[in-house]
Image (tube, grey):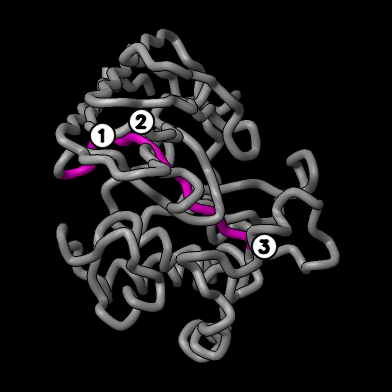
Amino acid sequence: MTISIRSSFAFTTEAPIDALLQFAVADIPEQKLLSCRTGLTDAARCARIPAQEDIGERVWVRANGRFEVQHEAQVEIQRQVIELSSLKQLEPHQMPAAPVKYLFDSRYCQADQFQSFVGDQFEGTAGGERVQAIRDWVAEKFTYAPGSSDASTTAHDSFIERRGICRDYAHMVVTLARASVIPARFVACYAPDVTPQDFHAVAEVFLHDPESEGGGTWQLVDATDMAKPDEIVKIGVGRDAADVSFLTSFGMVDLCEKVVQVLRD
């Protein structure tokens, strides 16, 4: 599957500020980058740095006034997608080092608060079956409602409100998976069926796969039903949305434009 992406955004500042940007398609083995072009407003400082897990990159900029970003890419998805229900759960003592940090609470995903809930709600399931049950529960119980949440909304807030946008769905899946002792992380991405077109977010869980290096495999999960694993284009991963925002500013900014277009070729 080949996917073409065009994204752009612009923000303004009233004084010089530092901003950390993460918007570019990640060049990683599971998605082959066929072409890429990025345009940035000239800045006093611009530095590219690796993103978390070396999936994608971030860009530090020193912005003053209006700053614009344009990004175009074409990517071929080469991801191995495995039926979730066929994958078992790794016991904590069996886990390699890398996914362990994704068992713990983070800013938006307070998994400890949901241990009793997952034990009752998803009793009798484990591993991939548990993840599938979590995905189905979130998809059934939540209403997709743009404007119903903001940058301060946590998984606990979303659990109470039972509504949100893609980041809230992803936070909920991540939280319930971690509460089930399954490593889970937040994925910023592009996907062609996201409506309205925008940056998207899904969850990714680490499950047992004896044929994979390290004994496990990361598998994508989207409870919004707007993105298929074999059509998701990763930008980056993190503990939650705080780690992979397309724009993190260290000072006041006004986001004045944002356009995303994702198409199947």
Q: In the image, 32: left or right of 256?
A: right
Q: Which amino acid does label 3 sit on?
A: Lys
Q: What residue type is labelled 1?
A: Thr
What residue span does the magenta drawing correspond to? 183-195
Label 3 residue SS: loop
Q: How far apart are marks 1 and 2 (CA)?
A: 7 Å
Q: In the image, 188: left or right of 182?
A: left
Q: Quadrant of the N terminus?
A: top left
Estimate the x, y position of residue 249 in percent, counting from the top left.
Answer: 38, 41
Residue at mark 1:
13
Q: Check disc 2: other Cα within 10 Å, few if <14, some if 14-19, many if 20+.
A: some
Q: Is residue 127 above or below residue 6?
A: below
- Res. 88 mark: 3
Q: Quadrant of residue 171?
A: bottom left
Residue 8 visible within the image: no
Estimate the x, y position of residue 205 in percent, counting from the top left.
Answer: 57, 55
Q: Check disc 3: other Cα within 10 Å, few if <14, some if 14-19, many if 20+.
A: some
- Res. 16 mark: 2
Query: Residue at the right extreme?
Result: 93
Q: Is residue 133 magenta?
A: no
Estimate the x, y position of residue 7 in percent, counting from the top left.
Answer: 26, 25
Q: How far apart are marks 2 and 3 (CA)?
A: 50 Å
Label 2 residue SS: loop
Depth check, mark 2 against mark 3: the one in front is 2
Estimate the x, y position of residue 217 in percent, counting from the top left.
Answer: 65, 46
* Residue at (26% x, 61% y) in the render: 150
Q: Do the residues labelled 1 and 2 touch (CB within 8 Å)?
A: yes
Q: What residue type is labelled 2?
A: Pro
* Residue at (46% x, 52% y) in the render: 242
Dot 3 or dot 1: first in sequence order is 1
Q: In this view, does 118 lie above or below 145?
A: below
